[in-house]
Image (spheres, rainbow, N blue to C red):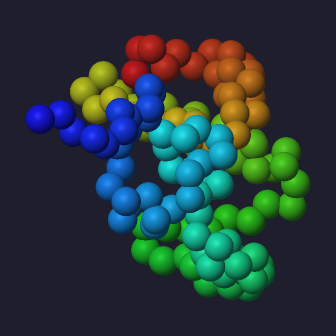
């Protein structure tokens, strides 16, 4: 006997009804969870954060840094790559996985590496 349930849509994973009720369908990529699927309560809580409460989130292994300009932020991001590579060695390679967010720091990374004549491929 054949099932009377509808065939899944092409390119979509089947999700149990309970799971689909937890988060709304993404407006960016329907097969993924992203910022458009966040619970409105979480978004409201985040909107109430201020400089003091953000700094208060610092704990061992997680430091909150605040920057005055985007340029300072992107430079700090670029320097994280450089510092990871400087700590790297052939026996103990190191690096950064990413980026997951903005990519504006990547041209800065290239300029710094070229300026220092750093050769990460040898690390």
Is 81 or 20 nearer to us in this picture?
Answer: 20
Left/right placement of residue 78 relative to residue 5 reads right
Location of the C terminus (image quadrant):
top left
Count of marks, rendered view: 0
Residue pictured at 52% horizontal, 15% vertical: 119
Q: What residue do we see at 65% from left, 41% from top?
A: 28
Query: Relative to residue 119, is residue 5 drawn left or right?
Result: left
Q: Is residue 95 above or below residue 19?
A: above
Q: Nearer the viewer, residue 18 or 85?
A: 18
Relative to 48, residue 110 above or below: above
The location of residue 32, given as percent across then percent down, is: 49, 43
Q: Residue furthest front?
A: 1
Residue 107: percent from the left, percent from the top? 74, 24
* Residue visible at 68% across and 16% down in the picture: 114
**Residue 96 appears anywhere in the view:** no
Q: Residue furthest left?
A: 1
For the residue pair 46 and 75, the one nearer the viewer reads as 46
Question: In which quadrant of the rendered image does the N terminus lie?
Answer: top left
Image point (49%, 20%), residue name = 120
- Where residue 29 appears, x then y in whole percent? 58, 38
Q: Whole-percent x and y of residue 94? A: 38, 34
Viewer can see residue 27: yes
């Amino acid at each position: 006997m054949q099932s009377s349930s509808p065939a899944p849509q092409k390119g979509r994973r089947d999700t149990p009804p309970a799971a689909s009720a937890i988060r709304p369908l993404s407006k960016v990529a329907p097969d993924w969870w992203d910022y458009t699927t966040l619970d409105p309560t979480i978004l409201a809580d985040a909107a109430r954060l201020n400089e003091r409460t953000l700094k208060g989130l610092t704990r061992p292994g997680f430091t909150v840094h605040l920057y005055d300009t985007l340029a300072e932020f992107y430079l700090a991001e670029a320097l994280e790559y450089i510092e990871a590579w400087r700590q790297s060695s052939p026996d103990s390679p190191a690096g950064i996985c990413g980026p997951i967010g903005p990519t504006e720091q990547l041209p800065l990374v290239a300029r710094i590496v070229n300026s220092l004549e750093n050769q990460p491929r040898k690390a």
